[in-house]
Image: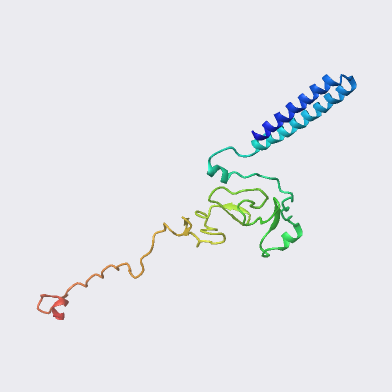
Amino acid sequence: MQEKHEHSQIFLSLQTYINLTLITEPNQQYSMMIIKLLIHVLFFFLINSLHQVLGQYSQLNTTSSWLKNHTKSYTLPLDKPPKPPICKIIACKRSGPPTARKRCCRNQCVDLLSDPNHCRFCFRRCRFAFSCCDGNCVDTNNDPSNCGQCGNKCDPGAPCEFGMCGYAAPSSQPGKRPRHPKRPRPPPSPKSDGELHDDRDDDE
């Protein structure tokens, strides 16, 4: 407000000086010079006022301390972000164990035989809860050749359920042998007096 008051005083003093000059010296050429000078001074004041107004709007006009603390002036970085490393095909193929099949997929070195997002081919994704075993999407919960994990084979005839071999198979109870049928008893032998003789009496 004080600067605006000073500007208005300067403007009024210039206007008074120009009026007095025009009255005392009514020279047309001189009056045109004064008018041009006045236009330049007004243009300077307008630019200065516009700069102050824009500076006030650029500042955050709020009473909230939280908003002032969390408001940042974002500037573009001068340095460009570093580029990600490029997947080299030859180095990717030679990396990893001999059983792996390494390839570059989406600028990443992956194993096509075990990666569920790139199974056998790049971008071939296995379904949910499926694993990539030797380049095939399998369900390790029910696959007898890959029960629980890749390469875990169940015994012949044993089912794979819930990732375990023979989970629901009937268990045999060792130690209990089947009972043999009783041998038939021999018939009683006859005695000399004509009575039947029982072998059980002799045992007693």
Residue 21 appears in the figure? yes
Q: Nearer the viewer, residue 60 or 124?
A: 60
- Asked whether residue 190 appears in the rendered view, the answer is no
| Horizontal relation, residue 163 to residue 50: left or right | left
Question: For the point 46% across and 55% down, which residue is it?
Answer: 162
Task: State the image coordinates of residue 168 (x, y, percent, origin top left).
Answer: 41, 57
Residue in the image at 61% along x and 48% along y: 125
Query: Residue at coordinates 73% horizontally, 30% vertically from top-left?
Result: 10
Left or right, residue 159 beside residue 100: left
Residue 47 vs residue 178, the one in the foreground = 47
Which image quarter holds the N terminus? Answer: top right
Could you tell me residue 58's position as x and y percent?
Answer: 65, 38
Vertical arrangement, residue 80 with respect to residue 31, above or below: below
Residue 150 position, x and y percent, is 56, 59
* Residue 129 position (above or below residue 164): above
Number of on-image labels:
0
Residue closer to the observer: 88 or 9: 9
Residue at the spot 80% in from the left edge and 22% down from the top edge: 20
Considering the image in quadrants, where does the C terminus appear?
A: bottom left
Please tell me in which quadrant of the rendered image residue 17 appears: top right
Which residue lies most toward the front here? 24
Say whether residue 134 is left or right of residue 170. right
In which quarter of the view is residue 190 placed? bottom left
**Where 73 sits versus 142, above or below?**
above
**Protein image colouring:** rainbow
Which of the pair 197/181 is nearer the observer?
181
Q: Is residue 53 above or below residue 145?
A: above
Image coordinates for residue 53, horizontal then vertical, percent: 67, 33
